[in-house]
Image: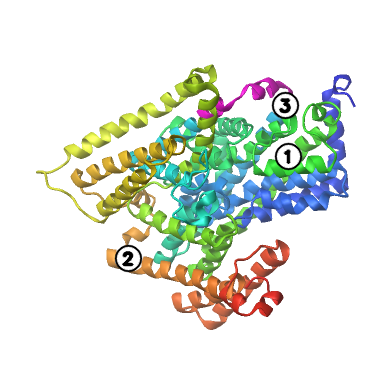
Amino acid sequence: MDATQTDLLGMAWHALNLLLEPQRMMILILGVIIGLAFGVLPGLSGVVGLAILIPFTYNLDPHTAFALLLGMTAVVTSSDFISAVLFGVPGHVGAAATVIDGHAMARRGEAGRAFGAGFAASLIGGLVGALVLAVSIPVLRPLMLAIGSPELLSFTFLGLSTVATLSGKAPLKGLAAAGIGLMVAMIGSRAQGGTLRWTFDTLYLWDGVPLVPATLGLFALPELADLAIMRTRIAGMSASNVSMSGQWQGVQDVFRNWWLVIRCSILGTVLGAIPGIGSAVIDWIAYGYAQRSEKNPETFGSGDVRGVIAPESSNNAKEGGHLVPTIAFGVPAGASMSILLGAFLIHGLTPGPEMLTKHLDITYTIVWSLTLAHVIGGVICLLGSHWLAKISLIRPEVLLPSVLALVFIAAYQGSHDWGDIVSMLAFGLLGWFMKLYGWPRPPLILGLAIGAIFERYLFISTELYGASWMWHPFVLAVFAVIAWVLYRPLAQIVTGLRGELKSARGGRLRFDTSTIFTILVLAICILAARTAWSWPVAAKLVPLTACGIAIAGSFLTLLADLFGAATKPDANKAKAAVAGELTSLDLPTGVLRRRASIFFLWIGIFASSIAVVGFIPAIGLFIFLYMRWGFGEGYPMSIACAAVMAVACYLVFDVGLRVAWPRSLVGDLFPAARELFDFI
């Protein structure tokens, strides 16, 4: 059917009628339910879901097949919001920005409000993304073809510029954290020419540090450590405020901030259409943009509902953006779109002009599937959020061990290597110290997410255009936006540093554990720079730049620590006090250190037991031991929780998903046992 001879509205109506047939609607709803289930479980992304579902579409017609696949893909990013809010555990890297304010709201007893705001913003963002997809494919074709590596590189600079707004009241520490994130992103053999950078003769690091274990370590483990140290429910003393009225309040927040929702949705759609700009970057850009453009930005980070609305609206809107280059040009904008591209080929479809002419009905089926999936998923989440919020009332001795088990499994999905678990533990310890001493964690994960993209586009741009890439009109426009974004934060950095140095009293130095941590960070960065100095120019350019940023930030932080006025170690404590929230920092120092040491000791015991008996048995063993002797829970409850969680993980991850588990000592000693149980 030639699109030039067909009325577009008539074709869209025809596609909608096809999708509304009972069988296809049931398939679409099934895909939505599967997507929501995948989003709730940390580590199970849309990529995993698509890989599992595609084989089941072989015998389906294209309209039905894409109803199933798009139904699943559309809502994964909606439900990963649940664990981000309740536990401070980003279900996937795209939900990391939501953790900052969403989890703070849950700890304050406003989980229901956060749910209402997040799900409503996701719904509207998804609809905006689908609308943009419907009208933009023919319009944006010239623009998409005009975007080259210099323009893509300018977007990475724009992403890095949001570090200033993600650093809160600690811009110097945020600058150092961003530099450290860029340094971590440079680890491996990704350099031109194959130079091994900071791999320490470890094969695992050759491909770099996976983003999933690092994200879970930086954000999940410190929050779970606080839960273990304080031994209070997630919602604290305000648990009774979790109600349907709170959820409706969140929906009202979205309509009150409707202009922010629209702006962030459009931003997410546009960035989603650009190949290489993944969800880990888009959400941080949306969060930074909201903080930069909204009134009273100082409340961001302490449970401001706008800090939930902005990333969640862009999070779902980007799915519509991802589909633009995938359908129109056959260029996947992300990992999930690469899998979906395979589904096109399986069903005899060639992305490109044919999708806008010969197969226009299928294109509109995709648009309608995306739209209806967002509506169905949003309604399900909104109706169920009242009961989901009740999870925050579960006692920590019951909840914490089970969540830790899921976090370990999610971290292992990074590259299915033992190094994933070690990486998560290392970043978890780093994240806890950063939280303790007031170092913002979002800039680090942003630097890690954007580092490899930045280096790749920088190399291509300089090879093709030399220094002239900086004078492309679109690049100059983006640089102007960056200058506008950075002006106020840079002025605050200069003013803040000057004030800190002026506050020195009689030349007396202030030296505490926070200062020791800063010195340690500075020493590691200097040592890393010294190591990188001998590498080839192409391999060391970005690493040395990252080291320079980290050294400058940490050195200025050290000056502020040594000569500045005495402050509490955690910059967030004042915010928590205003919100009526108790944190681990309210405990005496000795109690805090002892409980934190015990928590990380239990984490080490869990990792060791995985190495000895295998993942699934270790989950049951760890949950039983931690509940019984870590929290003093009774035998019946400890045994029941351990058994239920172990069986559930076995059925979902081993039987259902066929996860390739790490080899254990017991399995090596008894090969016959491994033949019977492949998880040991």
The residue to which callout 3 is attached is 137
Q: Residue at x 36, y 28 (%)?
A: 488
Circle nearer the viewer, 2 or 1: 2
Looking at the image, which is closer to me, 669 or 523? 669
**Along the polypeptide, which appears first: circle 2 or circle 3?**
3
| Residue type (three-letter) at the residue carrying disc 2 | Arg
Quarter of the rendering containing residue 482 = top left
Note whether residue 420 is visible. Answer: yes
**What quarter of the picture does the C terminus occupy?**
bottom right
**Along the polypeptide, which appears first: circle 3 or circle 1?**
3
Q: CA distance from mark 2 to mark 1?
A: 49 Å
Q: Which mark is residue 593?
A: 2
Quarter of the rendering containing residue 326 = top right
The residue to which callout 1 is attached is 370
Label 3: element kind: helix
| Residue 154 within the magenta-colored segment of the rendering | yes
Q: Residues within 10 Å of mark 2 (few under 14, many from 20)?
A: some
* Magenta residue span: 135-155
